[in-house]
Amino acid sequence: MCGIVGLYMKNPALEPELGRLFAPMLIEMSDRGPDSAGIAIYHDPLEDEGAVKLTLFHPDDDFDWEELVGFLGEDLQQSATVHAIASHAVLISDGDADLLTQAILGYNPKLQVMSTGRVIEIYKETGLPAAVARRFALEAMGGSHVIGHTRMATESAVTTAGSHPFSTGLDLCLVHNGSLSNHNWLRSTLERRYGLVCRTENDTEVAAAYLTAKLLEGRTLHQALEDSIDDLDGFYTFCVGTADGFAVLRDPIACKPAILAETKDWVAMASEYRALTGLPGVGDARVWEPEPATVYSWGWEAA
Amino acid sequence: MKSNVDIVDLAKVELREANAVLQQHNAGGRAAHFKVLNPEGAHALACGLDAPVIVEIDGHTGYYCAGMNKTAEITISGNAGPGVAENMMSGTVHVLGDASQYAGASGHGGLLVIDGNASSRCGISMKGIDIVVAGDIGHMSAFMAQAGRLVVLGDVGADFGDSIYEAKLFVRGKVKSLGADCIEKNMADEHRDELAELLARAQVDANPEDFKRYGSARKLYNFHIDNVGAY
């Protein structure tokens, strides 16, 4: 089943309220996905052009992140700062995202890189959405926009790595409600043709890698999503987070639900209307169901 | 507001309790009038009613509102989630906003009126229900529709009426494509009269002359006499 929620603030004055307004949306979708939850939040953009922000995960909350920073300094001559939040940590450095990722994964086999970019941070865990939101103090987070997912696992294990959102490149991520039927073929094709290696058995990770491959080919995000209508077989409602907005796409059959709502202050997306009822002014919002096989996007150039 | 209207406020009572209040006259079949406040997208609201009660729901509803309805008259002043009036037996369900997927699915009787649009699979497997949609409807609508009538004032999505049996489909707007074995049929006076009566009952203002009728070509396997021997 799974639940998807997204909230984008058109009015910057509401940005400090992002987490407080979004947490109830995520928690309302617990019935649709009680085994894991995750968010991709876009906040605190780095001012330095050359800097990069990585969200890292280690299953041990007491993992020594400062030691990792020390290792990066010695091994890569890369200075970095790190800020731990439960099982995750945000690492900021002026190094190259790919080199940092390789070094970090090589440093400890249990480490995972959840996101890379200048704005995005991804937090995800197994457990009830309310527990996950509490663990990462979601309510206290501000930001311009956030997308989230509550998971009811079907095709792969209930693990942190199998939870959504999935990173699809710098400041990009994907959440998915549905199931893809050609992901095994696609996984091997992406690895062979683009050298993109999926780390889990999860079908959504393959869709994320597919979008990454299309972007590497020079397609815009809008084009890449339209390409996916032809190339991805199965059921899906996708929500894609970008540095300055988000996009929504449903497959042509569109049996996975989605609802959109918009006011002058915000745009919201959810699997069901009941996730939106706490938003300010929702009673006067324009509420509609996105059409099948149609890309909807906010905040970025729909080229 | 009239004094004999009972308020059921979902901001104050649980969904189960609200449904129990709405269903309290089921056994005796007594007439009553309820107003439901703050539905907030709740699932399975006002389901299984089996008495001539009037229920006015003030807001948007979630999955399966007014399912299995029998004799009740239910109005939703908002949008309805997936499966509104699913398997309705009789009575009336009126959605003032839009309806999501499979509105009126497998309904046996009664009247479902949607003032806005309905999305995909509207009237799927309908078995006698009448559905009138003032706006557009989505793809795969009236799939395997067995009996009843579906009237659409707006446009219709792809694969309309696929594998249809005896249901009658009337469309004023454009049909993107017809499904397997669904064809346009002639509009005779009897069909215009039937449609006029239904539009009047739904209180929808439209001229029957502007509609086209669709139905089964009766060419699929089940309709071939040669296949009777298979059983």
Image (cartoon, grey):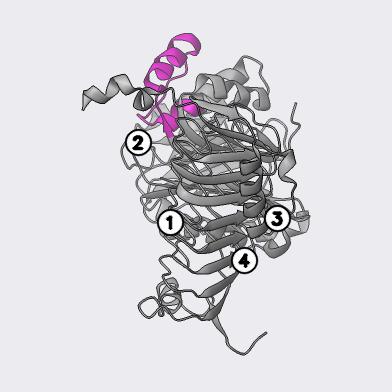
Q: Nearer the viewer, mark 4 or mark 2?
A: 4
**Figure check: B230 above or below B8:** above
The quadrant in which the C terminus of chain A is found is top right
Q: Which residue is mark 3?
A: B204
Residue A272 is covered by the magenta coloring: no
For marks 3 and 2, give the CA distance: 64 Å
Of residue A43 and residue B216, the one placed in the foreground of this image is B216
- The disc labelled 2 sits on which kind of residue? Lys
Visible residue check, residue B179:
no
The three-letter code of the residue at mark 3 reads: Val
Specify the farthest residue to the top: A193
Chain designation of label 2: A
Q: Name the front one of labels 3 and 2.
A: 3
| Chain letter behind tag 4 | B
Residue numbers of the magenta segment:
A179-207
Residue designated by label 4? B59
Residue drawn 38% across the image and 38% down it: A162
Give the numbered dot on residue A30.
Answer: 1
Q: Chain of mark 3?
A: B
* Residues behind callouts 1 and 4 on a single chain: no
Between B85 and B219, the residue placed more toward the observer is B219
Do the residues at discs 4 and 3 belong to one chain?
yes
Query: For the residue carrying disc 4, how many other residues have a C-alpha within 10 Å: few (<14), some (14-19), or many (20+)?
Result: some
The answer to whether residue B58 is left or right of residue B24 is right
Which residue ends up furthest to the bottom in the rendered image?
B3
* Distance CA(mark 1)–CA(mark 3): 40 Å
Q: The numbered mark 1 sits on a residue in which chain?
A: A
Residue bearing the label numbered 2:
A110
Amino acid type for the residue under numbered disc 1: Ser
Q: Is residue A221 left or right of residue A74?
A: right
Say which amino acid is labelled 4: Gly
